[in-house]
Amino acid sequence: MSNQTQSRLPVRRKSPPPRVVENLTLQQVGLGPFATVFIVIISTLPMTGLLIGLYYQRQKHYATRAFGRTLLMFATFLHFIYFCVLCPMLVVVGVERLF
């Protein structure tokens, strides 16, 4: 009778303690210095930096979350420069050439 009351669902694995997940560096997670530099260079493209930053911000390791937040701030700053400085400058230069 006791066998019928037990659930047949698989046993869930326990997650590691938070300190084990939190103490990993970027290199231990798989993001070495070359990968980090490559990601920062790629994130200068419009919208790409925002998407990469959002992706890394949602990871479980503290180092990748911090890297994602840094990329997100960097990409937000670049988009501000793109839309508030470069685009108006291009419009002004384009209008001056037309007239």
Image: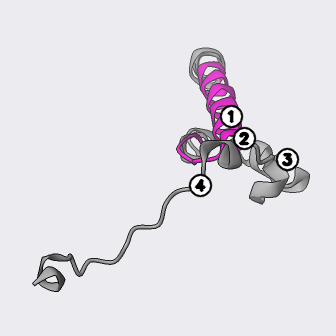
Q: In 3D space, how far apart are the residues under numbered discs 3 and 4 (Cα atoms)? A: 30 Å
Can residue 95 be seen by looking at this rendering? no
Q: Quadrant of the N terminus?
A: bottom left
The three-letter code of the residue at mark 2 reads Ala
Q: Residue at 60% across / 19% down in the picture?
A: 80
Camera-side residue: 4 or 52? 4
Local secondary structure at mark 2: helix
Q: Nearer the viewer, mark 3 or mark 2?
A: 2
Write down the residue under mark 1.
Answer: 66
Q: In 3D space, how far apart are the residues under numbered discs 1 and 3 (Cα atoms)? A: 15 Å
Camera-side residue: 39 or 93? 39
Q: In the image, which disc is placed on residue 37? A: 3
Q: Residue at 26% across / 77% down in the picture?
A: 9
Camera-side residue: 10 or 85? 10
Q: Nearer the viewer, mark 2 or mark 4?
A: 4
- Between disc 3 and disc 2, whose residue precedes? 3
Q: In 3D space, how far apart are the residues under numbered discs 2 and 4 (Cα atoms)? A: 16 Å
Q: Is label 2 in contact with label 1 (beta carbons under 8 Å)?
A: yes
Q: Is residue 30 above or below residue 76?
A: below
Q: Is label 2 in contact with label 4 (beta carbons under 8 Å)?
A: no
